[in-house]
Amino acid sequence: MARERKAEDVETCEVSTCNNESARSLSRKKVDKALGHSFTGGGKKVKLCKDHYKEFKKKTKKEKKLDSLGW
Ligand SMILES: [Zn+2]
């Protein structure tokens, strides 16, 4: 009975190949563009685990840098 709400308590990363516990929730558009993974779920937000969040941050950082260099 105590485990009834488990699905709500523990949310997992929505990268389709990943089952880690989610750490962050981010705009699907942004994540889609940065990572190019396929995701489960259909909301506007995508839940990411720590690892994928790190990856996302890395990629967006790079893009920003390239952007400013390009100009
Ligand atoms: Zn993940």
Image: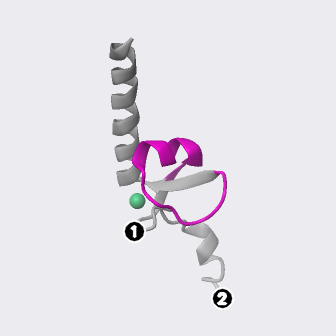
Image quarter of residue 27: top right
Q: Nearer the viewer, residue 53 or 1?
A: 53
The location of residue 69, given as percent across then percent down, is 33, 15
Residue, disc 2: 1
Residue 36 lies left or right of residue 27; in this view the side is left
Instruction: Please tell me whether residue 1 is drawn above or below residue 61 in the rendered image.
Output: below
Query: By what rule are the colours in the image chosen?
Result: one colour
Looking at the image, tell me whether mark 2 or mark 1 is earlier in sequence order.
2
The location of residue 15, given as percent across then percent down, is 45, 61
The location of residue 30, given as percent across then percent down, is 53, 41
- Give me the residue at 40% from left, 43% from top: 56
Instruction: Please tell me whether residue 32 is drawn above or below residue 20 in the rendered image.
Output: above
**Quarter of the rendered structure image containing ligand 1:** bottom left
Per the rendering, the mark at residue 17 is 1
- Give me the residue at 53% from left, 56% from top: 47
Quadrant where the C terminus sits is top left
Residues drawn in magenta? 23-44
- Crowding around mark 1 (Cα neighbors within 10 Å: few <14, some 14 to 19, many 20+) is few
Q: CA distance from mark 2 to mark 1?
A: 30 Å
Membership of 31 in magenta stretch: yes
Amino acid bearing label 2 = Met
Which one is closest to the eye, mark 2 or mark 1? 1
